[in-house]
Amino acid sequence: MARKKRLTIAEQRQQLADAGDVEGIWQIISTANPIMVDWEELFQLLLRAMIIRSRTEPERFSAEMLSRMFALTSFLTLRTHHHIARLIARYDRSDCGGSADLPREFDTILPRLIELQRHLGEIAHHQAGVCRLWELARGRRMENDRTNDSAQRPCRCGAIPGPVVVGVLEGGGCADQEEDCSAPETLDTAPRECNFTRREVEPAPAED
């Protein structure tokens, strides 16, 4: 039995990109030796993986990217908080401690902190909005699937419901209507019609 040919490193990376494995390519980039890799090639593979993933799993991929953005911005915000806290603590231990003034460096850090916090809130808002839109889209798809399925179900009288009642019929046939199109009193020699669509159907054969 012939042994399966082992893939080269380049082939393995290409396989990851073709499968849309963004996390796999990102791990290679994060742990790569800077002098041992072709950065242009790696980032091209990352771009290809992201394009494929966005096409095959758009909902999950968008959620992952928003989550990554929120995590990174949160990290930068907390780092800035930590730096400002240390700066103020060092200032308080100095001869100027106890004064109402803040360190001069604070004037350059504060606008950056405000921008980070505003950006963090915007990401959280967008994240919630995108989740809401995906939920609405999923609900609409489920509703359309139920509608299409209902359109194929025959009525109890044997007639196929027309487009007028698509979306109303939920598997109960004519049972939800005031009158039953298959009731005994309707079984005469005259043409009868479905109570849903009012389409004429052939009369049922009379019993001997």
Image (cartoon, rainbow, N blue to C red):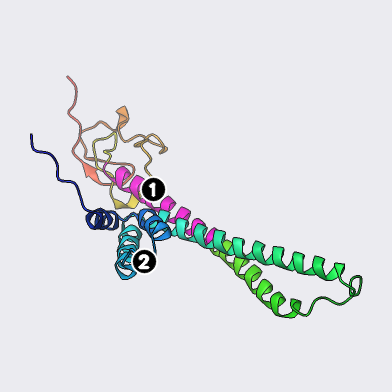
**Residue with the most extreme left position:** 1
Q: Is residue 95 left or right of residue 196?
A: right
Residue drawn where x is 14% and y is 41% of the image = 4
* Label 1, label 2: how far apart the Cα atoms are: 51 Å
The residue that mark 1 highlights is 142
Q: Over which residues does the magenta segment extend?
A: 127-152
Among the 4 quarters of the image, the one containing residue 137: bottom left
Q: Quadrant of the N terminus?
A: top left
Coordinates of residue 92 in the picture (x, y in percent): 86, 68
Residue 143 belongs to magenta span: yes
Q: Quadrant of the C terminus?
A: top left
Say whether disc 1 or disc 2 marks the residue closer to the N-terminus: 2
**In front of the other: 9 or 53:** 9
Residue drawn where x is 31% and y is 56% of the image = 20
Number of labelled discs?
Answer: 2
Residue 158 belongs to magenta span: no
In the displayed structure, 198 sits above or below 68; it is above
Coordinates of residue 96 in the picture (x, y in percent): 89, 75
